[in-house]
Image (cartoon, grey):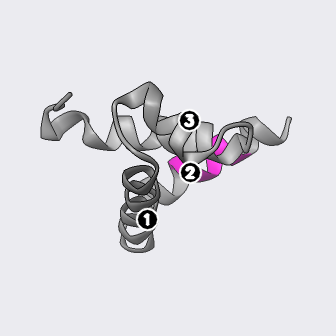
Amino acid sequence: MRISSSRVLDRDLLLYAIWQLGVRTNSQIGEIFGMNGSEVSRRMAVLNSKAADDESIQGRLSEIKAIIAI
């Protein structure tokens, strides 16, 4: 399923949250979103690359990690 370019970051942050929990494999996460495991891995690499240059994304990733650590 294709999503609009304006929603890609939201989807990737949701993927990241599930991925960070470590309770599902990339393939299992991909099934939820209509992707395969390598696409999930690629989206995590793209998100981390974007975060390196964007403080707002870094902050959102930190918030996700903090919530998961609770």
Please name whichever residue, 32 or 70, is drawn nearer the observer in this view of the structure.
Answer: 32
Q: Alpha-carbon neighbours of circle 1 within 10 Å: few (<14), some, or many (≥20)?
A: some
x and y percentages locating residue 23 in the rendered image: 74, 37
Q: Tag 3's secondary structure?
A: helix
Q: Which residue is mark 3?
A: 28
The mark that comes first in sequence, 2 or 1, is 1
Q: Is residue 11 above or below residue 51?
A: above
Specify the segment rendered in magenta.
Answer: 60-65
Which quadrant of the rendered structure holds the C terminus?
top right
Magenta stretch contains residue 63: yes
Callout in the foreground (1, 3): 3
The mark that comes first in sequence, 1 or 3, is 3
Q: Alpha-carbon neighbours of circle 3 within 10 Å: few (<14), some, or many (≥20)?
A: some
Q: Which residue is mark 1?
A: 51
Q: Tag 2's secondary structure?
A: helix
Q: Tag 1's secondary structure?
A: helix
Amino acid at pointer 2? Leu
Q: Which residue is mark 2?
A: 61
Which quadrant of the rendered structure holds the N terminus?
top left
The mark that comes first in sequence, 3 or 2, is 3
Amino acid at pointer 3? Gln
Please name whichever residue, 41 or 7, is drawn nearer the observer in this view of the structure.
Answer: 41
User: Tags 2 and 1 in contact by the CB under 8 Å rule?
Assistant: yes
| 3D distance between C-alphas at marks 2 and 1 | 8 Å
Please name whichever residue, 49 or 45, is drawn nearer the observer in this view of the structure.
Answer: 45
x and y percentages locating residue 25 in the rendered image: 63, 44
| Dominant secondary-structure state across the stretch colored magenta | helix
Amino acid at pointer 1? Ala
